[in-house]
Image (tube, rainbow, N blue to C red):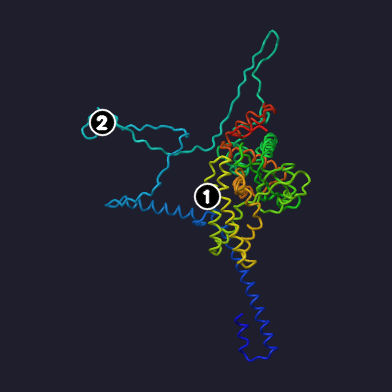
Amino acid sequence: MEALAQLDLLNLEPSAKTRLAAMIAALQRASAAKDLKIQALTLELAHLRRIRFGVKSEALPQTQRDLFQDTWNEDSAAVEAEIERLADGAAAPAAAKPKRAGAGRQPLPDPLPRIEHRHEPEACQCPRCGNTDLVLIGEDVTEQLDVEPARFFVHRHIRPQYACRPCETVAAAPVPPAIIDGGLAAVGLLAWVLIGKHVAHLPLYRLEQIAARDGVVLSRSTLADWVGRLGVALQPLADRLAWHLRRGGTLHADETPVAQLDPGSGKAKKAYLWAYRSNDLEPGPRIVVFDYRPGRGGGHARAFLGTWQGHLRVDDYAGYKALFAPEREAAPPCVELGCWAHARRKFFELHQANQSPMALEALRRIGQLYAVEAEARSLDIPARQRLRAERALPELESLRAWLAETRARTAPGTGAAKALDYTLKRWPALVRYAETGDLPVDNNPVENAIRPISVGKKNWLFAGSERAGQRAASIQTLLGTAKLNGLDPAAWLRDTLAKLPAWPNSRIDELLPFHTQIPQA
């Protein structure tokens, strides 16, 4: 605007002055657009750098870890070892380093088995006077942690056969039913294969190599045959878990892409693993169900939920919107719950990009909401509802007023405007949790459940077929639910594979990986 005002000071013809004013205005508009573009690209670049090189944690303040942190730790330990070795030959002892609070060796877990090694002196006499009448006054006990790699061994089943000469019959102990009739593998080996593939995310060829180091030949085709048969045997348990999950009144939902081979084309196509998680604030066991689908369309969520109705906690992906539409035909519409973690993430990324004071204030205000949730974590539902009404609802009202006032002073199209708009447009869904005592504040539980699979994809890279993806989803459903309920997935799987062949279908709930009793309808 100052440049346009200075045109009046120049002795120019009116036509020239008009053309020059238009050129200056165009340059100013281009400069403003360029500034907005630079700001948007700076925000995007900071986001990508944080994903690529930084810590995924959104805690504030955050100490960034370098990509080579492990190497630095190794080098630091090596330098300390060299210093200690040099100090051993020095005349004077090195000064002891001050101990940090909480530092030092942590005690080893009590449940670990202990193998005692007693070390008696070579000669039980006093080294000074030779006296042999020594008295035990104490013991110096130190513990070292050791590990024994996977140990392969053979179960040898011997069934004597007894003949009855008068009636010419033979009696022997019956062969108990097995998960794979006549198979080579015992339940412990079958559980080892499934845990290695679906918890450690090791491809079958790596399990083949691990067995080969102990001289055990397990071909990949044999391992694949076991995994396929076990998937069929465990499918009823996964289906039953999905049935129990849909009995809850509140669910979390999320999805992650999975590469799937496309036979005939020589390429991979994109499929999706959908995750549905129970609400920890409701009574009952914790359940996570994975549903493998060939796409990300909202029809896949509708197909899984069917006629289920309740509160659904999701991100802002458009595929879920049809579930909240009033004209939904299959059942009354679900009630949308917005995710405060996603809303917070917009301001976090903005603050990481340009240290925005506005974003920092938004993070502080949202942190107050999470402080209320931390205080309410141990309360029952009525007490949590009272606490939210007293503390969270006033904070939310103040936050909304501040967001609206800040947005009115923010230029459209900027990163700050986008972060503010994301929260304001979803406000009814974001505040719905605070009106109750049993609705969650964010979608973190299902994101935490799906994260190990997202990390494991770097090992197995892709699903070989749609059937393989569905089988993996069913097995992940069972093992993931076991972990959520505090069970050892390997121990639960061994016990279940041993019982399943002769287990009546009417008692299938007793095999599900629950710590708590299933509530009655």
Asked whether residue 48 is in view, the answer is no
Residue 174 is situated, as x and y percent measured from the top left of the image, at: 66, 20
| Residue 262, numbered circle | none
Q: Quadrant of the N terminus?
A: bottom right
The residue positioned 62% from the left and 37% from the top of the image is 218
The answer to whether the residues at label 1 and label 2 have Cβ atoms under 8 Å apart is no
Q: Residues within 10 Å of mark 1 (few under 14, many from 20)?
A: few
Q: Quadrant of the C terminus?
A: top right
Residue 480 is situated, as x and y percent measured from the top left of the image, at: 61, 40
Q: Is residue 118 above or below residue 362?
A: above
Residue 321 is situated, as x and y percent measured from the top left of the image, at: 72, 52
Between tags 1 and 2, which lies in front?
Answer: 1
Asked which quadrant contains residue 403, the reply is: bottom right
Q: Residue furthest right?
A: 329
Residue type for callout 2: Gln
Asked whether residue 192 is in view, the answer is yes
Q: Secondary structure at mark 2?
A: loop
Q: Residues within 10 Å of mark 2 (few under 14, many from 20)?
A: few
Q: Is residue 201 above or below residue 44?
A: above
Between 110 and 430, the one lying in front of the other is 430
The total number of labels drawn is 2
Residue type for callout 1: Ala
Q: Residue furthest left?
A: 129
Between 238 and 494, the one lying in front of the other is 238
Chain-order first, disc 1 or disc 2: 2
Q: Which residue bears the numbered disc 1?
A: 371
Q: Which residue bears the numbered disc 2?
A: 125
Q: Secondary structure at mark 1?
A: helix
C-alpha separation, residue under disc 1 versus residue under disc 2? 64 Å
Residue 291 is situated, as x and y percent measured from the top left of the image, at: 69, 44
Q: Is residue 351 above or below residue 165?
A: below
Q: Residue furthest top?
A: 166
